[in-house]
Amino acid sequence: MSTLNQLPVVVIGAGPVGLAAAAHLHERGIAFTVLEAGDTPGAAVRQWGHVRVFSPWRYNVDPAARRLLDEAGWVAPDLEALPTGAELVGDYLQPLAQLPQLKPHLRYGARVEAISRLGLDRLRTAGRESTPFLIRLADGEELLARAVIDASGTWGTPNVLGASGLPARGESTVAAFLEHGLPDVLGAVRDRFAGRHTLVVGAGHSAANTLLSLAELAEAAPGTEVTWAIRTASPSRTYGGGDADALPARGALGSRLRAHVDAGRIRLLTGFSVHALTPTDGRVSVVVRHADGSEESVTVDRIVAATGFRPDHSIAAELRLNLDPVMGATRALAPLIDPNEHSCGTVPPHGVNELSHPETGYYAVGMKAYGRAPTFLMATGYEQVRSVVAALAGDWAAARDVQLDLPETGVCNSNPADTVTGEGCCGPAPTAEPAARGLATGISGGLLSTPLNLVTLDVAPAGAQAGGCCS
Ligand SMILES: Cc1cc2nc3c(=O)[nH]c(=O)nc-3n(C[C@H](O)[C@H](O)[C@H](O)COP(=O)(O)OP(=O)(O)OC[C@H]3O[C@@H](n4cnc5c(N)ncnc54)[C@H](O)[C@@H]3O)c2cc1C
């Protein structure tokens, strides 16, 4: 055995996919260490613990993890039920992390700051593949590894509010008014929203969840106002497939949202591209700039930026990565997860072949593997790590035999009504439309390719929009 193979595989992140990797590594008899920045397993999931996911338990439990849990007498939840993020952690990730096969190999409060090769910077080629990885933690400690499975997710790097991918003018000056992701508006942070006017920016599952919670809060707390801003001309993609959605919970979410908008309880602003943000008398003014140069503004108390997330590849800056310039996924994976062509349910099976970089032995997996694509499902991540770990074990037949059983859905390009041209949004409609439709996974802030809006601010109710999202 070479010196390299005597070192453990380091897994970064103890989220659903990092812990699944640990279970597969255990099964394969490969030594491993999981480094988790938070204090607990599922630290990122806990932050959206109040949100109910739309994929049932049967898609959310990794098979290798399930085998270990079953051996330990785990009582599996109802596989058709939909857990909240908190239940995902409490009923699955926490018990998994407590198993004696995993627990001794998990380190909390261990934030990875950088990854390199011992003694080699990115320029040096000779001996690279046989040189251990060097992993530096935020406290300065350094570890060596034979391979790195980076399952650190994207939760820590939300997208900016500015419509061009750059921060809006003044975005940093209004941080006190701004929440990213999915604040618990009915629970832990209720006081920040009750009796206030909140602007939710984004068109994905996260935005929909926050809007529904705010609408519920508005019923209980007088003076609570809710405004929803999207870049496109139509919210139809967010409304999803209704009764036809392959994930019924997601369809129902969209239908409830539509009902609130139609009833005027949520004010919808379409064609909304944030240009500038200014603190104004304890509130914040949000300026929208239109294609013709004209500007409009709305003044609110709080803003929820549900604009999605992007990967942070900076920890791997000294490694040789081959990233797709659009998606921030590997070049081989990018076309398979492109939200212009795929929903989360139509992504083809993929594994080590698609996840490999020129840097042998480094694999970004899970949510991070998808870069900016909003099409990720846990089930996909579980198959990724099964394949990667099989490859690390030298079992290339298993590594390449990738399979996926995903809920079919067609979030992208599947609704001709989305545009005035009859094409799917931002591109030609696919030749075969999926039977069911729905919105993207919780990380979406809308399609990546949705261009800067070229339509006017529209405060009319849904159904009265002008223009197409790609016009
Ligand atoms: C609201 C919401 C709803 C979703 N609903 C569904 C759904 O219904 N079905 C579905 O399949 N998917 C869903 N997803 C998408 C996805 O499956 C989840 O986001 C999932 O948690 C991704 O798992 P992960 O392990 O890749 O990353 P994460 O869960 O984000 O875990 C990454 C871990 O890495 C740690 N970490 C980060 N940086 C470092 C570092 N530098 N060093 C060490 N540790 C680090 C974090 O603390 C975290 O614990 C949803 C996502 C969101 C946000």
Image (spheres, rainbow, N blue to C red):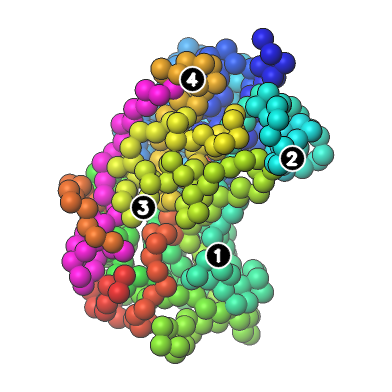
Query: Which three-letter amino acid code belongs to the residue tagged 1?
Result: Val
For marks 4 and 1 on the same chain, the one whose residue lies earlier in the sequence: 1
Which structural element holds mark 3?
loop
Q: Residue at x 67, y 74 (%)?
A: 173
- Report how far apart the C-alphas of labels 4 and 3 lie in the structure: 28 Å
Specify start and end residues of the magenta stretch as a single range: 399-426
- Report how far apart the C-alphas of labels 4 and 1 lie in the structure: 37 Å
Q: Name the residue under label 4.
A: 390
The residue most toward the bottom is: 294
Nearest to the eye among marks 3 and 2: give it: 2
For marks 3 and 2 on the same chain, the one whose residue lies earlier in the sequence: 2
Q: Residue at x 70, y 27 (%)?
A: 127
Residue 258 on image: x %, y % = 28, 64
Residue 388 on image: x %, y % = 50, 26
Which structural element holds mark 1?
loop
Q: Name the residue under label 1.
A: 160
Q: Mark 3 points at which residue?
A: 339
358 up-or-down from 221: above or below: above
Query: Which three-letter amino acid code belongs to the residue tagged 3?
Result: Pro
Q: Tell me, yes or no, whether the two marked residues, 4 and 3, touch with CB atoms within 8 Å.
A: no
- Report how far apart the C-alphas of labels 2 and 4 lie in the structure: 28 Å
423 up-or-down from 73: above or below: below
| Mark 2 burial class by Cα count in 10 Å: few <14, some 14-19, many 20+ | some
To which quarter of the image does residue 56 belong? top left
Residue 341 lies in the magenta stretch: no
